[in-house]
């Protein structure tokens, strides 16, 4: 019996040694892995329920990107931690009457247009920019981009009967940006379905600030329409500070920010 147990123990030790050796051999010494921000606890948490006691692993530490992926990246949109609350207006002194609000504006007459657009901008996939500048996340909807990035426009269009405009009914669909034209192409994009896309590679010398663009469409039936972004929203305190120290009060349009 002792001899048999000794053989089993010796065999198990050899097996564990081989597994460890193979694990080391399959891991490159130069490979960089996501590392925890803090060392994970070695101890386990013990959970007791009645007469039964079980051990469960302690929570894993939060993971971060490897340094080689984070080096040189700049966030397109950051967040401010512990931001101050909006200032509460100071109450008026006793006996002082507030200035009455101006009357509500009357909206213009409703428009009837030949073509209705939906257009947005997203980041491109990795490796698509000829300037080798990628977003940290591909296909992410945003209006802020860096120099060197490829911007992707996504578009769907309908005539005033509610019928989607596809290649069979479109004569031309063109993106005009920074003095250049790009033709939209219609295609399937995975689970997102079918829509039109066009791209623009932002030159490295592009001035920071608003990037103006329009879409011009013409149907085979002769209808034409132009799409432009909603006019910029400006308000006190809505300025953006560019990385070169310049400021812009344009708050709601496509921007080149760094």
Image (spheres, rainbow, N blue to C red):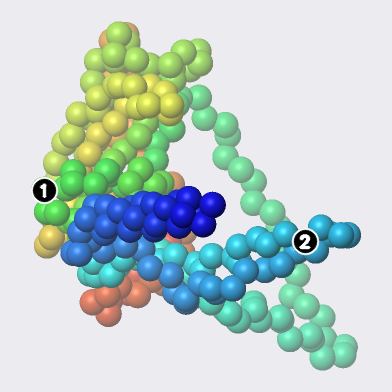
The residue singled out by tag 1 in the image is: 130
Q: Quadrant of residue 204?
A: bottom left
In three-dimensional space, the C-alpha distance between marks 1 and 2, rounded to whole angstroms, equals: 59 Å
Quarter placement of the C terminus? bottom left
Quick check: 222 above or below 181? above
Q: How many marks?
A: 2
Q: Could one spot residue 249 in this view of the protein?
A: no
Q: Quadrant of residue 125?
A: top left
Residue for point 37% across, 31% down = 155
Crowd tier of the residue under label 2, counting other residues whose Cα lies within 10 Å: few below 14, some 14–19, many 20 or above: few
Which x, y percent locates residue 121?
35, 44
Quick check: 59 above or below 195? below
Which x, y percent locates residue 42?
54, 73
Which x, y percent locates residue 112?
50, 24
The residue singled out by tag 2 in the image is: 53
| Lower sequence index among marks 1 and 2 | 2
- The secondary element bearing badge 1 is classed as loop
Residue for point 43% across, 32% down = 118
Residue 153: mark in rendering? none
Q: Quadrant of residue 32?
A: bottom left
For this orientation, the residue located farthest to the bottom is 93
Is residue 90 left or right of 200 when viewed as pictured? Answer: right
Is residue 48 left or right of 191 when viewed as pictured? Answer: right
Q: Could one spot residue 171 in this view of the protein?
A: yes
Crowd tier of the residue under label 1, counting other residues whose Cα lies within 10 Å: few below 14, some 14–19, many 20 or above: few
Which x, y percent locates residue 8?
45, 51
């Amino acid at each position: 019996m002792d001899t048999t147990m000794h053989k089993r123990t010796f065999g198990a030790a050899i097996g564990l040694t081989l597994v460890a050796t193979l694990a080391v051999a399959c891991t490159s010494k130069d490979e960089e892995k996501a590392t925890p921000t803090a060392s994970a606890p070695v101890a386990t948490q013990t959970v007791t329920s009645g007469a039964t006691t079980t051990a469960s692993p302690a929570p894993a530490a939060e993971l971060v990107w490897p340094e080689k992926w984070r080096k040189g990246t700049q966030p397109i949109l950051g967040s401010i931690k512990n931001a101050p609350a909006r200032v509460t207006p100071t109450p008026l002194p006793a006996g002082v009457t507030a200035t009455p609000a101006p009357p509500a504006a009357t909206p213009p007459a409703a428009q009837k247009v030949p073509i209705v657009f939906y257009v947005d901008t997203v980041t491109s996939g990795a490796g698509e920019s000829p300037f080798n500048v990628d977003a940290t996340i591909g296909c992410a909807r945003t209006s802020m981009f860096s120099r060197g990035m490829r911007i992707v426009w996504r578009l769907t269009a309908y005539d005033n009967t509610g019928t989607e405009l596809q290649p069979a009914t479109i004569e031309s669909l063109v993106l005009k940006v920074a003095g250049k034209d790009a033709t939209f192409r219609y295609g399937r994009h995975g689970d997102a379905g079918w829509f039109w896309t066009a791209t623009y590679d932002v030159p490295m010398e592009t001035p920071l600030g608003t990037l103006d663009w329009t879409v011009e469409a013409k149907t085979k039936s002769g209808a034409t329409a132009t799409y432009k972004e909603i006019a910029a929203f400006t308000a006190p305190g809505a300025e953006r500070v560019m990385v070169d120290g310049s400021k812009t009060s344009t708050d709601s349009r496509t921007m080149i920010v760094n």
